[in-house]
Image (spheres, rainbow, N blue to C red):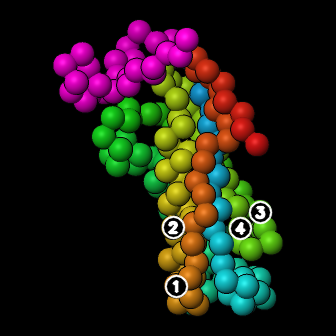
Amino acid sequence: MTTIPTLTHVNADGLPGMVDVSTKPVTARRALAVAEVVFPPEVLAALRAAGWNTKKGAVFQTAIIAGTQAVKATSTLIPFCHPLPIDSVRFSHTETDDGIRIACEVHATYRTGVEMEALTGASIAALTVIDMCKALSHAIAIRSVRLLEKSGGKREVRQP
């Protein structure tokens, strides 16, 4: 028998609303999200040769600042996200064959998770990379944004 999942942000009358987290325990929460940015081969080669610096400045340093700001602003961007006391935000990046993979890890000690904050941070960092590099090509794309891990809540998540 298959159960139909219920939407947590819709009440019995079908109206949207913020979930009441007041009775949830305060726990340490962690989420890790990634975004992949894909470049045309000649652009990727040029960026690598330039040490990932463009006329606008240092690509990754700027993306980290923008991503961190986005993590802290998530509740103002996504209507039903609770404002969270963020404990830490960390970014890393890995070069791939056709671009880069940006990881955003967020920690908070609160009643609700930080998945949306990690996803928002990774997304905005990726968009910032595109903005920093768009003078080189408009064919730069974000291939995927996804949650890899979360812990500290009701359900743990670990994805490849």
N-terminal of the two: label 2 or label 1? 2
Q: Is residue 74 visible?
A: yes
Residue 43 quadrant: bottom right
Q: Quadrant of the N terminus?
A: top right
N-terminal of the two: label 3 or label 4? 3
Q: Which residues are magenta?
A: 1-26
Q: CA distance from mark 4 to mark 2?
A: 12 Å
Assess whether mark 2 and mark 3 are in contact (beta carbons under 8 angstroms): no
Q: Is residue 26 left or right of residue 13?
A: right
Local SS, label 2? helix
Assess whether mark 1 and mark 2 are in contact (beta carbons under 8 angstroms): no
Q: CA distance from mark 3 to mark 2?
A: 16 Å
Mark carried by residue 100? 4
Q: Main secondary structure of the magenta part?
A: loop
Residue 100, how many percent across, how many down? 71, 67
Q: Which residue is mark 1?
A: 138
N-terminal of the two: label 4 or label 2? 4
Q: CA distance from mark 2 to mark 1?
A: 12 Å
Residue 122, how many percent across, how many down? 57, 55
Q: CA distance from mark 1 to mark 4?
A: 16 Å
